[in-house]
Image: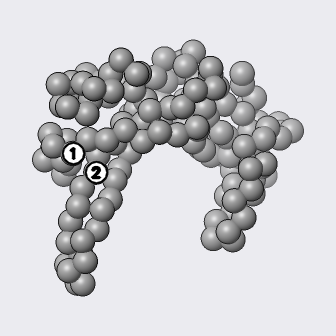
Amino acid sequence: MFRSVFKRARCIVPASGYYEWHAAEGGKQPYLISAADGTVLSISGLWDRWKEPETGETISSATLIVTAANDFTRRIHDRLPVLLGCQDHDAWLTGKAGVELLQPAPNELLRMWPVSKRVTVSGRGDDDPNLIEAVESDAIVER
């Protein structure tokens, strides 16, 4: 499905972190996962431009590449984004590197903590910076 864009249209999506949800008593508990050292994560991705068949409008879109979870994050979710090290950026973007980079990140690269369940509510327009703060929870708490 993504064979042609894998060869010609790679990207890196910078992120300070990402959310995953873990099934817990009382509903799903969201976690924020970020770099253990506080730096920006480099998530591998693919992009494309295509025409919407009904309107003919040109659409730019992107997708993040995910892989199996590492041992650290597997306790809350079965997959994670493919994270690239700075040393791999050029090789990824130019196509000099391929599927060998699509591996789970080392456990020690990441940290995670439970955050407010308000993260789950979308469409309200409340982009609240407090949504990345740790909350008290009976859920898994990590470094």
Q: Which residue does the numbered mark 1 point to in the structure image?
A: 9
Q: Is residue 31 left or right of residue 110?
A: right
Percent position of residue 22, x then y: 64, 43
Q: Is residue 41 left or right of residue 122?
A: left
Which residue lies at the image location 69% right of the left edge and 63% below the top edge?
121
Q: Which residue does the numbered mark 2 point to in the structure image?
A: 47
Which residue lies at the image location 29% right of the left edge and 46% below the top edge?
46
Q: In which quarter of the image is residue 35?
A: top right
Q: In this view, does 9 lie to the left or right of 114?
A: left
Mark 1 residue crowding within 10 angstroms, few (<14) / some (14–19) / many (20+): some
Ranked by sequence position, the earlier of labels 1 and 2 is 1
Q: Is mark 1 on a helix, strand or loop?
A: loop
Mark 2 residue crowding within 10 angstroms, few (<14) / some (14–19) / many (20+): some
All told, the count of numbered labels is 2
Which residue lies at the image location 20% right of the left edge and 80% below the top edge?
56
Q: In which quarter of the image is the C terminus?
A: top right
Q: Disc 1 residue type?
A: Ala
Asked if the residues shown at circle 1 and circle 2 are in contact, with their CB atoms under 8 angstroms apart, the answer is: yes
Query: Can residue 6 be seen by looking at this rendering?
Result: yes
Q: How far apart are marks 1 and 2 (CA)?
A: 6 Å
Percent position of residue 98, x then y: 21, 27
| 16 relative to 72, above or below | below
